[in-house]
Image (tube, rainbow, N blue to C red):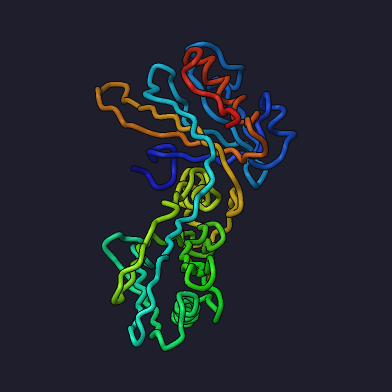
Amino acid sequence: MGLAGQNQVRHMYVGQAAVDDIAGLKAGNANDFVLLSQDGSAVGAGSDFRLFQKDGLGNVISSDIIKASNVLDVRSVPYAAPVLKKVTIDGLTVDVNTLYTVNIEIQGHGSLSPEDTYLKQAFYKAGSGDDAEAIVDGLIVSLNRNFAREIGSTATSNRSFTFSKTGSGSNAALVVEGKKDDLNFDADKKIKIYDEFRVDIACTTYPTVTITEAGSQGTGTGYQVMEMERFLLGERGDTYRLNGYPHNIVGPALASVASGQYDIIEVSYYDEGRDEAKKSKKTLTIAMATAAIPNAEVNSVIADLNTILGAGSVDTIKAS
């Protein structure tokens, strides 16, 4: 596949507002876009189409010309907020002179590979007069002290987890909770920080360890769209803008933001040679910042796609 050009197999456009025509695009703001027939006229049933966008330099750029008959699948993907994973250790029994060891196995830390695991531990030895709350308090101190060694962490907080206590006395419980990716997004490396993890404890009398919230990375979060935009900017040559230091090629800034929320449209289609039967599958990805639900900007593009492909081909973004 081509790294910089219309031949690459996946193009991505991050938009701020959908306009009606090319004139509106030229008069509008950077990252506005419009879906039109391939010649710039209004879309019609079965027409070839492409996406036009005003880039950060004020130029009007466009996607591939896509034949309606070559479209394989179109789907809309509404934004879904991430859910933090949470594990609770409760029902602690106090066994004097017993060492309580909390194990947090982090998967994919650093390398992002699930085979790469990183073990962090906390320790507390129960003494005479201790109750479950004393054990939980001691484990929280130990966990924070251990994670304080990590980059970007302090004696009381770190980039990956929150350690807290619920209840008191004999009913106290330890809660280990993950943190959102967009809060920890590395803007320089453009990679996610999210850690998948498991929690367990070793002690004489085993307590209850419960995954109280399974957790989800969400869909259309700012860090996800920034990742995609960062690595799919080849059409405009922007993937090269940080190469060749100190003579860097400087292009438009990313349109997406780590704190943003985005609805997405995916158009799967194929190109085929004029004199041969080979088909090259491609994807057009459109991400639109979610200002309200339903997202009128995304739905206007979906309406155009339904005009081209037939009513009901693409679901609109609806209020949940």
**Most foreground residue, 304 or 205:** 205
- Lateral position of residue 7 relative to residue 188, left or right: left
Total count of labels: 0
**Most foreground residue, 281 or 199:** 199
**Most foreground residue, 210 or 29:** 210
Residue 105 visible at all:
no
Q: Would you place residue 257 above or below residue 265 in this image?
A: below
Q: Position of residue 211 (x, y in %)?
A: 39, 56
Residue at the farthest right position: 27
Name the residue located 38 percent from the left edge and 67 percent from the top edge: 110
Quick one: quadrant of the C terminus? top right
Residue 20 visible at all:
yes
Name the residue located 45 percent from the left edge and 58 percent from the top edge: 86
Quick one: quadrant of the N terminus? top left
Q: Position of residue 249 (x, y in %)?
A: 54, 59
Tell me which corner region of the image, top left, top right, bottom left or bottom right, holds residue 302: top right
Q: Would you place residue 186 above or below residue 95 in this image?
A: above
- Lateral position of residue 151 relative to residue 55, left or right: left
Name the residue located 31 percent from the left edge and 25 percent from the top edge: 273
**Most foreground residue, 86 or 105:** 86
